[in-house]
Image (tube, rainbow, N blue to C red):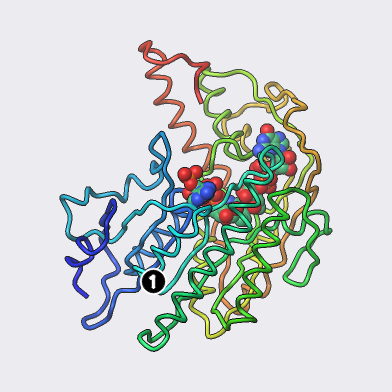
Amino acid sequence: EGEGEGGEKYSGQTAAIPGGMPGAGDRRKVALISGITGQDGSYLTEFLLGKGYEVHGLIRRSSNFNTARLDHLYVDPHNSHKARMKLHYADLSDASSLRRWVDSLLPDEVYNLAAQSHVAVSFEIPDYTADVVATGALRLLEAVRIANSASASARARPIRYYQAGSSEMFGSTPPPQSESSPFHPRSPYAAAKVAAHWYTVNYREAYGLFACNGILFNHESPRRGENFVTRKITRAVGRIRLGLQTKLFLGNLSAARDWGFAGDYVEAMWLMLQQDRPADYVVATEQSHTVEEFLQAAFGCVGLDWKDHVVIDARYFRPAEVDSLKGDSSKARRLLAWKPRVGFLQLVRMMVDHDLELAQKEKVLVDAGYIDAHQQP
Ligand code: NDP
Ligand code: GDR
């Protein structure tokens, strides 16, 4: 299938990126990603484009542009016939939009990354969270099942499905947590992810769908949303270092998390869908650190003491907390030959360096009087 056809065949915004050309006669693999505008969606898109895929992403309507994490991959559809990333409007709450894109694209692989992914926010908007995270996964599974059965004879290989599961599903189950550890969710978000997990298992068992749950522990990057604790800290470190801010308000500092680098984790998602058989896998660094340890490392990178700046604010405490997460990812390491490349201190340094640079740019605007320091972020 020629690349030129792709740009005309599919509506929506497009992008092109070099690399990963398939051999002569090979059909390009097609991936469909929900949640493409999120942290993981942007890394997975880069990864799949590098493997030669044509990548389609579902984006939702927003009053502001929500594609900032994809801007570096974007090419105006009017200028490019070589576009290999294409964006389409859909929503996990809208089954017909999911059916439409799965049916018309008939992708090789579907990655369900879309979610209301903030644990604390899920206590504020619980039924929306359940609708998108749990029922949204069911809607997408159903779209894939129907497309597979409708096109069974025409397709060499049925569509494969990846579900973005979470270590939050283990909740209060003590570490180390593996595929055989019981789930004990501690938030509406986590309970909804447990439902999505079992929907995925059920579609595998009931319909023979090639469907995998990746049970991923926390993974971060310079593209992490700014209200997750790691990024909140590194943004503050950059701004405090440059005098744009003095205090950082946080909640529970004693929670422990197994923090890895998002760029490493998207590879595990892809590997799961390349196996002979579908299965569920824990993906983790197997190292755990408290929020306080993250603070120490991040402020330490710029020669500051976090205790001079952090103020505890009760509003950031959660109605129920997940105290301690540390994954046992031996199954993924054995069967997928996956292992993380970026360690804890390297991750902290990467995020701090990025956010120092960001703060330097902000400072230029503040000094020139274009923005107020206290307005940001
Ligand atoms: P983000 O919050 O960065 O991205 C979430 C994505 O979902 C965004 O693209 C968002 O769109 C989209 N989205 C939200 N609601 C809807 C909806 N109703 N319809 C369609 N799309 C929607 O999350 P991450 O990239 O960090 O995580 C990816 C997935 O992995 C999520 O499902 C998350 O729950 C899960 N996960 C994440 C972990 C982590 O540590 N990062 C660990 C384990 C699981 P928009 O940009 O418009 O907001
Ligand atoms: P988490 O990530 O809940 O693990 O979910 P988050 O960074 O929000 O919290 C980690 C820990 O830090 C504590 N904390 C704070 N958290 C936030 N956001 N803001 C604060 O000010 C603050 N102060 C302390 C929290 O209480 C918590 O213990 C993330 C999300 O990406 C989920 O979608 C994903 O499923 C899991 O990781 C694995």
Residue at 81%, 66% (x, y): give it. Answer: 182
User: Hey, which quadrant is residue 25 in on the image?
Assistant: bottom left
Q: Is residue 312 left or right of residue 40?
A: right
Q: Which residue is mark 1?
A: 107
Residue in the foreground of this view, choosing between 296 and 92: 92
Residue at 48%, 72% (x, y): give it. Answer: 144
> Relative to residue 131, is residue 243 depicted above or below?
above
Count how many numbered circles sit on residues in the image.
Answer: 1
Q: Is residue 253 left or right of residue 331?
A: right
Q: Residue furthest bottom?
A: 153
Picture coordinates of residue 290 (x, y %)? 74, 44
Picture coordinates of residue 92 (x, y %)? 51, 54
Q: Amino acid at mark 1?
A: Pro
Q: Is residue 155 visible?
A: yes
Residue at 32%, 66% (x, y): give it. Answer: 54
Residue at 61%, 54% (x, y): give it. Answer: 133
Q: Is residue 261 visible?
A: no
> Relative to residue 279, is residue 242 depicted above or below?
above
> Relative to residue 333, is residue 101 depicted above or below?
above
Residue in the foreground of this view, choosing between 307 and 326: 326
Q: Residues within 10 Å of mark 1 (few under 14, many from 20)?
A: many
